Image (cartoon, grey):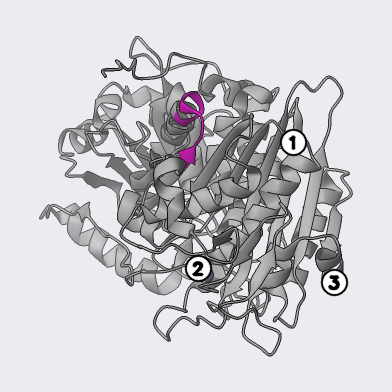
Amino acid sequence: MISTRVKSVVPINLCHAPRFTVQSLFVSIWSIINNVQFRVQMATDIKFNASLSRTDPQVQPVLIIGQLRHLNLLKFSQLAGKLEPRVNEETFKNAIACLHPAPTDKCSLYLDVATVAALPLKASRHNTGSRAHSITRLVKNHVLNVNEESVVLVCERENLFASACAVVRAFPLYSRKTGNGNGGKSPSSEVGDGQPSRSVVNVEFVIIDKDGGVEQEPLSQDDINCLNETARGIRLAARIVDTPCNEMNVDHFIENVSEFAKELSIQPQIIRGEELRERGFGGIYGVGKAAAVPPALVVLSHEPKGAQETIALVGKGIVYDTGGLSIKGKTAMPGMKRDCGGAAAILGAFYAAVKCGFKDNLHAVFCLAENSVGPNATRPDDIHTLYSGRTVEINNTDAEGRLVLADGVCYANKDLKANIILDMATLTGAQGVATGKYHGAILTNSEPWESKALQAGRKSGDLLAPIIYCPELHFSEFASAIADMKNSVADRQNAQSSCAGLFVAAHLGFDYPGVWMHVDMATPVNCGERATGYGVALLLTLFGSHTSCGLLQSIAPGDEEPPSKRICRD
Ligand SMILES: [Zn+2]
């Protein structure tokens, strides 16, 4: 990845309006005790419940989160099972009445163990109606990390999936802190490791229907399964991204792919090391050949009977990016363990999609390499022939992601015969400049699919914003005197994220008749020091109509009219 990253700061923007009551004094004292006794971070299991379980907040703390307009619709009796006998109706009503979200607000209902929080009032057209990012922040800041607690999400059904995913993002798995419940061990698997100190977060829902009432039907088993598998996928992706390269090199990444493939009864196809060179994968081989651990192209294929379409997801898996000989500086390199975020998201999404009954052919293509420095490293000026047969003059070894992806998408077309190809990558620092910390950038040859991708972003909480697709104006940035193209642009001020994506498309061919989508998620891959698992929920939603899962189908973008009907004027 080419990085122009500025050190990011975790935003803390919660509104803490002072409330000087006797209760607040107790709350403060209790908070201090809590901090000492309980707030030791433990490995957390997330459990989705079909309906509200009856619990005493003294025993099982509860955090209730919703938009103010929904919280105002609630009757105390609908939440009494989570609050009695500690909270009465009057306290509940008074607490909701004193919430003034700007952008969020919270009020204690009982000591520190029962809290109600309001989400931002406004969600603009490029935001998710679920206010997912605020949910994650509220949960991160207000769960107590005790043995067992509950988060109750008050929301409309269309926001259930995004809201649930937002809670999941608050509980990353990877930690090497000693005494955190992992016993200092690496959490190589996200399932229970037998340590006694794991905590459980129960996630429960109060669904507000169209008429402002509360849905009485519990969630179906299908819904619960979907949420569980999605949560596993998100946490898997985030764990891989958070894991440093000394524990997540290409070997380890392949082990993770193989572990999940085994659960799905899929045999991974692995092309590795010198075989990459022999078979013409000059992009992946050229980027990874200097590393001690050889590069790999790994493919998982799900090919159910009756499949109508073939979808390939191609992920950039640079397990570490030093920049190669065009080396990054000492401030630009830290964090480059995250340069495999695209491949990690595709593993999580592929796993959950197959678990949710994917009905069409689905391939996951992992382009894995460590962009390292050594006697075998690719030099600036070297020319590589990629899997497409086209030649590339390397002018920047730090623009390596596009080289591995070019081989990946070309393989998806030539060998897998995919008619929809989506690649996902932490590709450019410029993505953050163009579309920010929350929105990945979507570049595509298809306007209907651009519209679908934007909708899927809003429905999943993994937001997207479109960037310009215009190869006839932009591709000349890669002009080379002696090869088909260079790998880095002449002018970095000229739609850099679009150009980087176009390099990938050039190897697929600009005349590729299928749908090509490119998601650059260099910045939303993490928030502060932690991975977000960005991309898993997005892909599940975008291709939700290809699954047999009712929940994913209900939020999948439809084949509606493109948003604009253009008028051509000469
Ligand atoms: Zn790079």
Q: CA distance from mark 1 to mark 3?
A: 27 Å
Residue 115: numbered disc: none
- Residue 219 as seen in the image, left or right of residue 136: right
Single out the mark in the foreground, 1 or 3. Answer: 3
Q: Is residue 446 magenta?
A: yes
Q: Is residue 220 visible?
A: no
Q: Which residues are magenta?
A: 443-450
Instruction: Provide residue 364's location: percent of width, then percent of height.
Output: 72, 46
Q: Who's the residue at 48% across and 73% down the image?
A: 335
Q: Nearer the viewer, residue 473 or 523?
A: 473
Instruction: Provide residue 432's location: percent of width, then percent of height.
Output: 35, 57
Single out the mark in the foreground, 3 or 2. Answer: 3
Residue at the top extreme, as displayed? 211
Q: CA distance from mark 2 to mark 1?
A: 38 Å
- Residue 386 as seen in the image, left or right of residue 492: right
Please give the residue where the numbered disc 2 appears in the rendered image. 41
Q: Considering only vertical position in the picture, is 429 above or below 534?
A: below
Please give the residue where the numbered disc 1 appears in the rendered image. 362
Residue 274: numbered disc: 3
Single out the mark in the foreground, 2 or 1. Answer: 1
Instruction: Provide residue 317's location: percent of width, then percent of height.
Output: 64, 61
Q: Is residue 110 magenta?
A: no
Which mark sits nearer the N-terminus, 2 or 1? 2
The residue type indicated by label 1 comes to: Leu
Q: Residues within 10 Å of mark 3 (few under 14, many from 20)?
A: some
Question: Where, by quadrant of the figure, is residue 121 drawn?
Answer: top left
- Residue 11 as seen in the image, left or right of residue 59: left
Question: Where, by quadrant of the figure, is residue 295 drawn?
Answer: bottom right
| Secondary structure found at label 3 | helix
The residue type indicated by label 2 comes to: Gln
